[in-house]
Amino acid sequence: MDHQIDRIRPALAVMVLLILCTLAFAQKRSSCIECHVKLDDPRLSGPAKLFDNDVHRGRGLSCNDCHGGDPQAETSEAAKDPRKGYLGKPRTADVPAYCGKCHSDANLMKRFNPSLRVDQEKEYYTSVHGQLLKTGEQRVATCISCHTVHGIRAVNDPLSSVYPLNVAETCAKCHGRAEYMSDFKIPTDQIAKFKTSVHAKALYDKQDLSAPTCNDCHGNHGAAPPGIASVANVCGQCHARQADLFQTSPHKAAFDQQGFAECVTCHSNHDIAAPTDQMLGTQQGSLCVNCHSNGDKGFVAAGHMRSRIEELIASINKSNDILSLAERKGMEVSKPKFELKGATDALTHARVLIHASSTAELDKVMAPGLEVAGKGYQAGLDALAELGFRRKGLAVSLVFILFLALLVYLKIRQIESRQPIAK
Amino acid sequence: MRLKAMQDWLDERLSIKTLSGAARKKEVPVHRHSIWYYFGGMTLFLFVVQVVTGILLLLYYRPSAENAFESVQFIVTEVQFGWLIRSVHSWSANLMIATLFIHLFSVFFLRAYYRPREMTWVSGVVLFFIVICFGFSGYLLPWNKLAFFATKVGTEIAGVIPVIGRPMLRFLRGGDDVTGATLTRFFGFHVAVLPATATVFLAIHVLLVQLHGMSVPPSVQKQNLRKMKFIPNFLLRDLIGWILAIGVLAALAALFPWELGEKADPFAPAPAGIKPEWYFLFMFQTLKLLPAKILGMDGEVLGIMAFNFVALLLFIVPFVDREPGNQRRRLVFNIIGVVALAYIVVMTIVGYVT
């Protein structure tokens, strides 16, 4: 057996060499790039230079895979021969189909990225962008407006124009320009507003990539403003519990009747601020008084819910204060401090439950929350009482100890007066 | 009559009369440096406090990464007077190290190691290092955040010693990292290995002190020296010190209970500004101040080697400075002592302030 292997060993070596050479030559030669990078006009050389970092190049594709033509040809004319399938630069209206040639082909995409969706083109035509494009409007976004062209990067590449941290700026290229959008009669302050929102703080300040940016609410390929009926569904993607509770609340029917968009009516849309307890209640500045007036059922419920929440907050603060005081005085209170988190959890739960606008539901979590906070306060009182006991005990012990020391001292005096220390 | 019979019975079997006779004969010289004689006894007393409170803590302490912190928390919150025992154990440990330092330096400056007391000094130095090990191993046992990282840094320092460092680090940690295995190991050292070794050396040390009697410093005129009886005069004075020490310990435990901190989390980042216990601070500060490279060698390694060298020098002090009449050598040793003391004090303060 070994002998046979020895005989075929040279043949194997030659085969490996041949395979390696074939692979080296298989790296397709592209006369497109060779010529275009040398051109002086940046409009013509730019794409060839940008293509170096393109995700498609990384997957082994070249210019002709989109533009057609013959990259093996020696002359420009031969390379761009329409008989060899040369398409040239697509018109704006043709871009979705141009990309869709591959990206809508499930079988083809499996070869490159089986997990990638193949309905982008179809979805695009459901978007406002796609709808307008169909009417002949040229100033709308197509694939390349967001993904760029020739230097296209994968979505998870931080340098990609559609990476979560870059999406808002990409949309703002058009939607932030008042003169560009003037004919479409839509506002252009969304980006500025979004940057003040709690979502933007999470995204940019905390670098939380799961925080929403434009496309998470509006969709990406099918981008459109969510209608009144679908707003709750959009927010409910993340805020599921709040959305579910709202469906059970008396507000649901009232909002539908009045034509109010569900979440947006209280929380606004692009400039959503971190919710505060001040939004709830009957005092001036609360959101409830925008619709409810003194005496009506909602007004009473809003006042009740706010006061219950304030009660729990006060109870938690009181417990926290006394436990911190005991801790500063050196008492070990980490266990009751940890247990107090149960009350904070109840508070968080209560703040979510207000979306059901039901005082009965709210009271169900309030009672255990207040009980936990009360136990924390009692633990603080006990710790301080224990501290007092220790100090009193110390005082008594010290008296006893000093008395004992004095007795011994007197004993020494007594002994040494009888028998002085001799030389 | 019955007492006399009991004494006779015991004397016949244990020769207690010979022992008590010797104890009665024992005398302590009285001079201007006599105060320093009390620090050995005080250290011994605090050691006894450690043994007693340590045994009480053992009733509830559970030596594992999962239970150690919770068991100490249980001791200080649920067990009757557990807080007192735990705090006294921690405070007494620190006071013992302080009195031990004082005892060591006073013996050094008063030249109590001169012939024939060389072995008393050597056994004392061994006890000094045992106590330091007690401190280092005991610090980890509550398994809190500070202790965890202090042990991590401390064992890392041991690990940089050339050749033996790495195996020593693995031996101390029971692996490459500080884990539950380290805790169990340190517990074993703290409650079995170190107490056993300490008992042996303590017995030798105390026996030697009895054998040679109290040393009189060379600077004290030996003629016409006043002497007090060890029993009862000196012992009663010792007793006053011990009673007051109990008072101090009780006050410290009640007014400044030893903190437990947060439970150790091996995956959490090290807290900022981490510092070792005060008695290691001067060494830690030195290592921090040393440049990264000294004459092409790693500064930290050099520093650690230097401390090890000084520790070895401590053992041979009585064999180098052995001529009471040699004034020049006495001066040199005095200067060395003062410089070392000043260095420790200054570096400890710098360590605390920075």
Image (cartoon, rainbow, N blue to C red):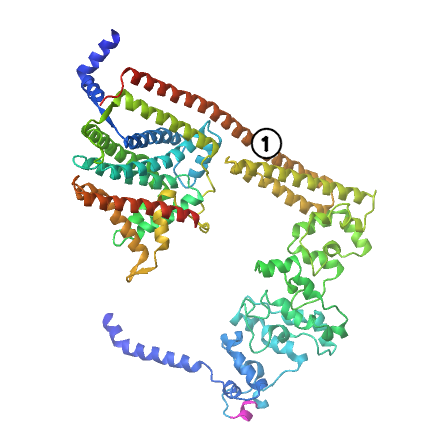
Residue B76, x across and y down, in percent: 46, 32
Q: Looking at the image, which residue is at 47% across and 31% down?
A: B254
Q: Is residue B222 above or below residue A162?
A: above
Which quadrant of the figure has residue A379?
A: top right
Q: Which is more toward the observer, A25 or A368?
A: A368
Q: Is residue B19 above or below residue A63?
A: above
Q: Is residue A274 left or right of residue A300?
A: left
The quarter in which the N terminus of chain A is drawn is bottom left
Can residue B173 be seen at all in this image of the molecule?
Answer: no
Q: Looking at the image, which residue is at 38% across and 48% down?
A: B152
Q: Is residue B27 above or below residue A333?
A: above
Q: Is residue A184 left or right of residue A7?
A: right
Which amino acid, by three-letter code, is at mark 1? Gln
Can residue A88 be seen at all in this image of the molecule?
Answer: yes
Q: Which is more toward the observer, B268 or B45?
A: B45
Q: Looking at the image, which residue is at 21% across and 37% down?
A: B113
Residue stretch in magenta: A75-80
Q: Which is more toward the observer, B221 or B209?
A: B221
Residue A16, x across and y down, in percent: 34, 77
The quarter in which the C terminus of chain A is drawn is top left
Residue A341, x across and y down, in percent: 58, 41
Residue B316, x across and y down, in percent: 20, 43
Q: Main secondary structure of the magenta part?
A: helix
Q: Is residue B336 left or right of residue A310?
A: left
Q: Which residue is mark 1?
A: A378
Using the image, name the chain to which the residue with label 1 belongs.
A
Which quadrant of the figure has residue A231?
A: bottom right
Q: Residue B317 in magenta?
A: no
Q: Is residue B295 left or right of residue B254?
A: left
Residue at disc 1, secondary structure: helix
Give the total of numbered labels: 1
